[in-house]
Image: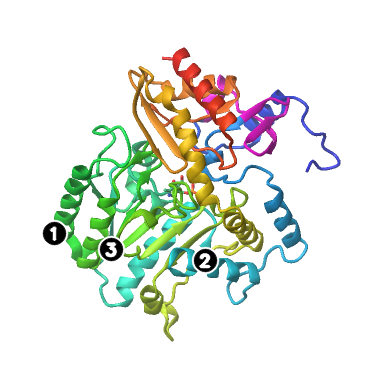
Amino acid sequence: MISPNKKAPTNNADLINRSRASVWHPCTQMKHHEDFPLVPIASAHGVWLTDVEGKRYLDGVSSWWVNLFGHTNNRINLALKTQLDTLEHAMLAGFTHESAVELAERLNRLTGLGHAFFASDGASAVEIALKMSFHYWRNVGNAKKQKFVSLAGSYHGETLGALSVTDVAIFKDAYQPLLHNNIIAPFPTAISHHDDFPCCVECADEAADALEQLFALRHHEIAAFIVEPLVQGAAGMRMYHPRYLERARALCTQYKIHLIADEIMTGFGRTGTMFAWQQVAAPLPDFTCLSKGITGGYLPLSCVLTTDDVYAAFYDDSSARGFLHSHSYTGSALACRAALATLDIFSDDNVITANANNAAIFTSLCAPLRTHPRVNNFRHLGMIWALDIKTASANFSRQFFAAALQRGLLLRPIGNSVYFMPPYVIDAAIFQWLVDETIAVINEIS
Ligand SMILES: Cc1ncc(COP(=O)(O)O)c(C=O)c1O
C-alpha cells in the first residue's frame, strides 16, 4: 500500500533508482546493477509476477523456492485477512495461541516428530537444530560432542552457524575466520554418472562407506550430521539415491550422532512426497528443519521438530538445561495462519497426488530439452526439473538469467545448471511455454 503522500511508481526506472539508492539487495554484488537492471515488481498473481510497466514474468523458481500455490492465492489471502482481525502477533514465551498450537499439532502428525520450535528463516531453523543437538549432548553428559558433519556442496543458510555447515565457496570463503571448523563428508555423486533419478546406488554406497570411516574415527566429537535429503538445492539441484540416507541413518544411530534433515527446500511436496524423508526406507531423523514453502511463500516462518528423547533431555528444574533460544517473532500468528491455510490446500486438493500426475505430464513435455545437443544430466524429482549445459561460458548463468527475463521468464541457473521449480499451480500449457522459451534461450546464448 502506498502512503497517501507518495504516488505509486509509474515506471520501472523510478522504482529501480529508488531501490538502488535505499535497499541493499541480498545475494548481490550491487555494482552489477549498474548495467544489469533490477526487476521492479508491482504485483503478482498465480505463477506470474508483473513489473511496474505491466510486463509479466513466469516465476519459474517459485520466488526462491517458497511459493507453492501461486501468488496472492485467494485461500491464503482469506485466512490471513481473518487472522489479521483476530490476532496479529503475541510473544510466544510465556504465552501461546491457537494458530501456533494447531500448526505444531499438524506438523507433528505429518512428520512424526514433535515439539515444534518456531523461528523465521531457514537459516535460523538450522541454527536452532545445531544448538539443540550440541546442548542435548551436553545435557546428557557428553559435552565433547561439538562438531557437525555436512556433505560436500551442502547449503544450509548464511548465518554464521548455518554457514559453518555450508560448503559453497562463494558464500563462505570471506567469512572463513569466523566459522566453526566442521567436517565435510563426500557427496554421493551421481549426476555425472547417470542421466536420471534414481541415481547411482554404487555412488551412495561409496559415500556411505566414507561416512562410516569418518564416524568410526571421530564419533566422540561429532554431535550431528546435517543433510539436505535427496536433493542439494544450492549446489545445482544435485540429486542422489535414498540408499545413502538409509545407510547414514543407521550409522548415526550406531555411532550416537544426531541426524538433522534439512527439509527447508525439499519439504512440502517439492520432491514428490510431503517430505523427502518419506522416500527413505529408514527411521525418522532426529531433527527436521522446515521453512520456505511452509507458508505457501507468504511470510517468513521456520520450524524445528525433534524427538521426545531430545525434548526430554532439556525438561528439568534448571533453566540452564533448558533451550533458552528465542526470536522476537517466534510463532508469528500471521505466519502460522498462512501455514495452516497452506496445509488445508494440501489436504483439500489432494496436492501430492495431483502433483504426481502433473509432474508426469510436465516431464514428458521436457523431451526436447532432454535430447537437446547442449544438455547433459537431465534430472527430475517431484516438482523439480534440472539439467546441465555443456560448454557453458564463464558467465553463462548471468547471460541466461538476462536473456530469459527478456522473454518474460524468471529462471536463475546455478553455474551451468538450469532448473525449473515452479509453483504447483502451473498448468501444462504454461509449462510447455516454459520449455520452449528455455530452449530458445539455450540456443541464443553461449
Ligand atoms: C536446504 C536449505 N537450507 C537452508 C536454507 C536457508 O534458508 P533461508 O534462506 O530462509 O535462511 C536454504 C535456502 O535456500 C536451503 O535451501
| Mark number, residue 217 | 1
Circle 2 — which element?
A: loop
Q: Which of disc 2 and disc 3 is earlier in sequence?
A: 3
Q: Which residue is nearer to you in this view: 39 or 317? A: 39
Task: Tell me, yes or no, whether the two marked residues, 3 and 1, touch with CB atoms within 8 Å.
Answer: no
Query: Mark 2 or mark 1: which is in front?
Result: 1
Residue 94 magenta = no
Q: Position of residue 443 (x, y in %)?
A: 45, 14
The amino acid on which the numbered mark 2 sits, given as a three-letter code, is Ser
- The magenta-colored residue range is 30-57
**Which residue is denoted by mark 3 in the rendering?**
146
Amino acid at dot 1: Leu
State the residue at coordinates (79%, 41%): 2
- Mark 2 or mark 1, earlier in chain: 1
Residue farthest bottom in this picture: 317
- Classify residue 320 as left or right of residue 430: left
Q: Residues within 10 Å of mark 3 (few under 14, many from 20)?
A: many
On the rendered structure, is 333 left or right of 280? right
The reply to whether the residue tagged 2 has its Cβ within 8 angstroms of ligand 1 is: no
Q: Is residue 354 above or below residue 25?
A: below
User: What amino acid type should be assigned to the residue bearing mark 3?
Assistant: Gln
353 and 425: which is toward the camera:
353
Q: Kindly tell me whether residue 420 is visible in this rendering.
A: no
Q: Residue at x 43, y 86 (%)?
A: 317
Considering the image in quadrants, where does the C terminus appear? top left
Figure label count: 3
Q: Nearer the viewer, residue 5 or 418?
A: 418
**Tag shown at residue 326:** 2
* SS for callout 1: helix
- In percent of width and height, residue 181 lies at 27, 52
Label 2 close to label 1 by CB (< 8 Å): no
